[in-house]
Each structure stands twice: as C-alpha cells, then as structure tokens.
Amino acid sequence: MSLIELKNICKSYPLGDGELPILKNINLQIKNGEFVAIMGPSGSGKSTLMNILGCLDKPSSGQYLLDHKNIESLSSDELADIRNQMIGFVFQGFNLLSRTSAVENVELPMVYSGVDKTERRRKAEKALIDVGLKERMYHQPNQLSGGQQQRVAIARAIVNEAPIIFADEPTGNLDTKMSVEIMHLFQQLNRDLKRTIILVTHEEDIARFADRIIHIVDGEISIDEKVMH
Amino acid sequence: MKKHSIDISVIFNIAIRAIKANKMRSILTSLGIIIGVAAVIVMLAIGNGAQKSIQNEMKSMGANIMMIRSGVATSGGVRGGFGSQPTMKLSDGNAIEEKISKIKSAAPVLSEGAQIIYANTNWSTNITGTDNRYFEIKEWAIDYGRSFVETDVKNATKVAILGQTVVNELFGDVDPLNRTIRIKGVPFVVIGVLEKRGENGMGQDQDDAVFIPISTAQKKLMGVSFPDQVHMVMLQAIDSQSTYTSQDEIRALLRQRHNLGANKDDDFIIMNLTQMMEMMENSTKIMTILLGSIASISLLVGGIGIMNIMLVSVTERTREIGIRMAIGARSWDIRRQFLMESLVLSFIGGLIGVIIGIIGSFIISASGAMTTELSLFYVILPFSFSGLVGLFFGYFPAYKASLLNPINALRYE
C-alpha cells in the first residue's frame, strides 16, 4: 500500500526558445510510515521534487497519486485543503510568523481547517510539549534559538495530525549538536506517532537518520537504498 | 475532506495585529479617510445649515409674500434708486386686496429710524407704521397687551406695539403696558408687546422694532410727500403659485391707478420674495451637493492612500502569505485577510472622521461664522461611504495577494 506514488513524473521550465528539464521520468513509491531522505547536490532537482510531492507545484507530465487521489485534477483551493489536512512542512528558514507567539504559530494550520478556539489552543500546547518546548510556548520567534524555532515549526507540522511531514533542509541553519537533536525528534515522530517523513538534504550524515535514501542526480533517481542502523 | 469556514474573529484579529505592527503607518493611512469623512460631514452640515436658515427666514417672513415699492425717479438723467420717487398709497394696497382674488391680504408699511425715550432711557430703533394685517401676514402674535383696534387707525391714535428687544432696552423689568414713550418727542402709549422672533436670515434682530398705526405715522410722525403715502405694500398671495401669476394683474391695476400712459415706465416695483427665497433655497441645495462632492474627492484620495499602503503591505508580507498558503490557506482566506485589514483601516478612519466632523461642525456653529445643521443621515452617509472606499480600494491588493504562487512567496526575501 503506497501512500505516495509517482509515475513518470517530468517537470521542465521554459528557458529561451526551448525548455529546461528539471525532473526526468521519476518513478517512486513511498509507503505509509516510512522515513525517507531525498539526497542530491544543489541543482539536482530535489527541491522541485519536494515541491511537487508537497502539492505546492504540479508536474509537467506524469501522474502523482497521493493517498490514491490524483493530484493533477485538483484546483488550487483543493490543493490548499490537501496541504492543510495531509501535509506538514518544515523549512530550512523555519518560516514562522514574526510577532506571533510559538503557540499561535502552531495554531495556524487549525485556523484554516476551522478548529474552534479552545480546541486549537489545547492541541497546539500539546504539540509544543511533544517537541519539548513546554517552557517557551508564549515566546515569539525572535526570543527563541534556531533549534527552538525549528521545534515550533515541527509542532506546527504535526498539530493537524497530517500523516506526512515534508522537511526541506531542516538542519541547514543549525549547528551540529542542534541538528542531531532535531533529527532525533524526527525519528521519534516517525517511530512513536507513525508519521511518514520525507526529508530533503544534501548532507550524508543527516540523510543517514532516515531508513531509506533516494539519491537524485540530474533530475533522475540514481540510487534507492535502505539504511542499516 | 471536510473544510469548515474560518471564524471571522480570527481574520479580524490578524488584521488588528497587522495594523498595530505598523502603528505610525496605519495612522497616516487612516488620516486620508479621517480628513475625507470629517470634511464631508462638515461640508454637508454647512450646506444643511444654510438651507435651514433660509427655511427659517421664509417662515419668519410669512408665506407667499410679495412687496410693492415705489419706483425709480429719473431727474436729468440721474436715476434715484428704489423709493426715490414716492408713488405708493395705502389705497393702492387696499385696491389690490379687494380686486385681485389671488391676493389674500395687503399690509401698508411706512417706516423710518427714530430715537425713542422712556423716562431717562433712550434707544434708537425702527418705527413702522402699519395695521394688524402686517402681523397677520407675518403670523406674529401679541405676547401681552393688545393689537391695534379700528379706532386706532381711524383716529390716528398715538399708541405703540413694541418688540421684545425694545422692551428690554427701555424698560428692563418694568411692565411697559400703558406707559408713555416718546418717539421723536411725540408721546405714545404702549398697548402691546409682540412675541419674541429672534434674528432673521440676514442676522437682523426682528424684535428691535416699534409698530404704530399707519394713519398715525402718516399724519403725526413721519414726513410724507402726499397724504396717503406708504413706503411699500406687503402682499400675501393665496398660494406660492399665485405670487408668480398675480403679477400681471397687479401691474395692470397699479398702472391704471397711477394713470400711467402706454409709453411710460412703471413707477413701482413688484418684488416676489417667495420666488427669491425659493431661488436661494435651490442654490443652497446645489451648494450642499457641490460642497459634499468636493469633500468626497478627498475621501476618494484617502482610499487611494489605503490601496497604496495595502500594496506595500502585501509585498512586505509575501513570505507570510507563502507560509499561510503552504499551511493550507485557500486564496479566499488570503483575500479576506487583506480585505479585512483595509476595511478596519477605513472604518477606524471613518469613525475618527465622524467624531472630528461632528466636533468641527459644532465649533463652526459656535464661532458664529456659519450656521451648521447635523443630521443622522448626513453622518451615516460619509461613514458608510468610507467603508465602501476601504472595500473598493482594498480589493485589488487583496486579490493580488491571493494570486501569489506559494513557492515563490516562500522564497521571497
């Protein structure tokens, strides 16, 4: 049973008279509960693949089935709903709202899914406790360290009980010690909360935290390997 | 996958937070709306006030009024101006009243300024010789005492009816009835005091006046060129329309009575005060509309200010929009957020504008420069207009925000 299934996905951008191919014929299946790392050098197309997987972008051709639903036929508002219900994002630059407390940042996905106020606050506080930020719930992002901000972002990604977490270079702005802590947190979410995690990185050590590594080179999958822990 | 609609209070809180985050900018943006709304309210209040004072004037003047004055004397090419050639007689007025059915009443007026004395107090005021028809036309009642009786006019008795201002100036707290005052040295007995009338539209105190019988004025007080002379005749037509339609008949009658040949000019002038007032009323209506429209332009300019700042705000918050979209905000959610922000800005501006406009109207009234008249409608109108302006000028920036591509928006630095 595949949660994510890509069939012959191609993506190209117009360049001058012709087109610049970024992704070439990607075929990929990810099962529910997997922890996958997508690795590749910059310019390999891994971020583009990530955007398509995250329903932020649509492929030029090919078929993307997310939970057996064909993404291609959906409107932008329906894609927004899918992102809201199915997907949590964690970005390299944290992407938290400034001048907004940690707990309010975490509430944000529930604002757009129409959860009522008290329920929102309760769930947001629980998610923050889950990521180990019990003491700093009402701090604003600029009062938090990079690692703490990334924990807030992770809490935001899990709070709506979305089955998939996409993490795009989540440790890119963090030092080694914090990076390890964040990766342990992802492992814990994968193990304990059974979330499917898809991680994009260019660092081998970070990718090793996942159970499966997909290497992308020049827009194609070169190696798809299992990681032995 | 069920999607509930978002709480409007959440959207409202986001807007308030964004507005608070840039306090100075928000105040400056609202200032355009504040000035616009306040200007519209003040301008409408001024126009309304002018209209109201004309209506008051019409009321104090009496309904459907015309005046006939003596015409222009020409001697050796020099034209003397109105009344320079006395021609009107008391009997002219009576004839008009009697023969022209469209005229209800004709009151004679013979007046001049004079000094009046009571005991050791003196006062200069206007003395008018007339009869009871004058008070009837003006709907001006006697406060206490009595009005003229037939014998007063027939026998030219030396009796006077006073306006309230004259009573205050001459008598103070003393009861003026049956006291004797001297007008140009001639003793008159006070028989009545008129109700207080206040200022007319020109700011003249109508209560600063003394009335005596027309016959007394003609025979005993004022110099007349011929026995039955009056300065003018005040006419009251049966309705507003008749003030226009009766003029030809009046003219024909007077020409006949004054023995004017076909080649001679009129020696009298008919003034239709009702018509003048109606014209003034119309012109103040136009003025009100004009003032209001000019002020609305500033409201519109304020709206452009809002649009400008909202566009800046959308650009500044591109990343925020990207985050919200990635997390699951639909385009309508984004649009609503920015629409709400511009609406709140314009409503806050509108509210402050209403307060300033009302205070401003009172200050203008109190300073005596102009009369202003506020009405609920003319306050609600610009306020709701400010809301419309916010909606209209906020829509484009909000629409622009909702069209952003989440990937590009997230990458925006």
Image: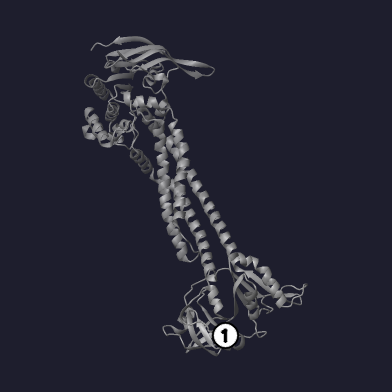
User: Mark 1 falls on what kind of element?
Assistant: helix
Residue count near mark 1 (Cα–Cα under 10 Å), binned few <14, some 14–19, many ≥20: many
Q: Which colour scheme is used?
A: one colour
Q: Quadrant of the N terminus of chain B?
A: top left
Quadrant of the rendered image containing residue B243: bottom right
> In front: B44, or B237?
B237
Q: With B92 as the anchor, is A181 left or right in this view?
A: left
Task: Tell me, yes or no, if residue A89 can be seen here.
Answer: no
**Label 1 lies in what chain?**
B
Residue at the right extreme?
Answer: B263
Q: Which amino acid does label 1 sit on?
A: Val
Q: With A13 as the anchor, is A4 left or right in this view?
A: left
Q: With B6 as the anchor, is B402 left or right in this view?
A: right
Residue A31 position within the rendered picture, expressed as x and y whole percent measured from the top left = 29, 14
Q: Mark 1 points at which residue?
A: B153
Q: Which residue is drawn at 65% across and 80% down?
A: B91
> In front: B211, or B65?
B65
Q: With A123 as the anchor, is B342 left or right in this view?
A: right
Quadrant of the rendered image containing residue B29: top left
